Image (tube, rainbow, N blue to C red):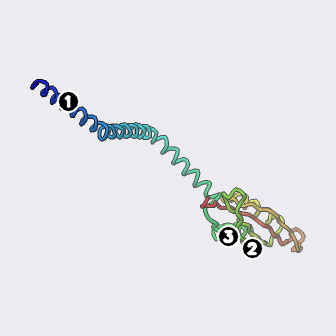
């Protein structure tokens, strides 16, 4: 009988150890093993990114340089004063008189990516000077589009020179930062 009680105690101890081991495995080891596996996957992914880093840095620098070029053409804000200074410089370099410069309210384009800033400009020039102004404006880094122009009030200065009033509307553009 004593042998039977000893066997029951051994079986009870073995069952207890198995039960404790099972609970330890279920509540502690399994979560830890899952966390270790997740961390190993993250480490492998980070090593992959580390290998790609020099290529990505080269691409990033190239994109930054392109952005600088394009942001001169299509800036992030209106920048009307610098535009007026640049345009005024072009007009004065050709010996033309700037009569008026009137920016209008900006209009959002249909896609919402950028704004269109209309500007009404009037100058007094000869035909040749007017053409040179339009040519110089077309060479500006910033996008600046001459839409419509009118020539009026011709005045004969001498046999080779006719002074005219030129009015034109222009558009400049800038990015919509909120998009």
Quarter of the figure that contains the N terminus: top left
Instruction: Indicate which disc residue 84 carries.
Output: 3
In the image shown, does 28 or 99 lie closer to the viewer? 28
Q: Residues within 10 Å of mark 2 (few under 14, many from 20)?
A: some
Q: Position of residue 28 (x, y in %)?
A: 29, 40
| Residue 13 spot, x, y in % from top left | 18, 32
* Residue 163, picture quadrant: bottom right
Q: Secondary structure at mark 2?
A: strand
Q: Is residue 169 left or right of residue 20?
A: right
Q: Is residue 165 above or below residue 176?
A: below
Q: Nearer the viewer, mark 1 or mark 3?
A: 1
| Mark pair 1, 3: CA separation | 91 Å
In screen coordinates, is 106 left or right of 31? right
Task: Kindly check if marks 1 and 3 are in contact, taking CB atoms under 8 A apart as contact.
Answer: no
Q: In whole angstroms, how far apart are the C-alphas of marks 2 and 1?
A: 101 Å
Q: Nearer the viewer, residue 140 or 96?
A: 140
The residue carrying mark 2 is 98
Q: Is residue 14 above or below residue 163?
A: above
């Amino acid at each position: 009988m004593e042998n039977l009680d000893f066997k029951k105690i051994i079986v009870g101890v073995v069952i207890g150890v198995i039960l404790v081991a099972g609970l330890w495995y279920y509540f502690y080891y399994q979560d830890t093993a899952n966390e270790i596996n997740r961390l190993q996957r993250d480490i492998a992914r980070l090593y992959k990114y580390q290998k790609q880093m020099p290529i990505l840095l080269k691409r990033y620098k190239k994109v930054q340089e392109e952005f600088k070029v394009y942001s001169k053409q299509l800036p992030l804000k209106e920048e009307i004063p610098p535009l007026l200074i640049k345009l005024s410089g072009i007009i004065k370099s050709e010996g033309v008189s700037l009569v008026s410069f009137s920016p209008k309210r900006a209009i959002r384009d249909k896609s919402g990516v950028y704004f269109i800033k209309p500007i009404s400009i009037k100058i007094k020039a000869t035909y040749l000077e007017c053409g040179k102004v339009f040519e110089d404006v077309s060479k500006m880094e910033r996008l600046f589009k001459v839409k419509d122009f009118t020539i009026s009030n011709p005045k004969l200065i001498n046999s080779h020179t006719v002074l005219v009033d030129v009015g034109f509307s222009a558009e400049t553009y800038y990015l919509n930062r909120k998009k």
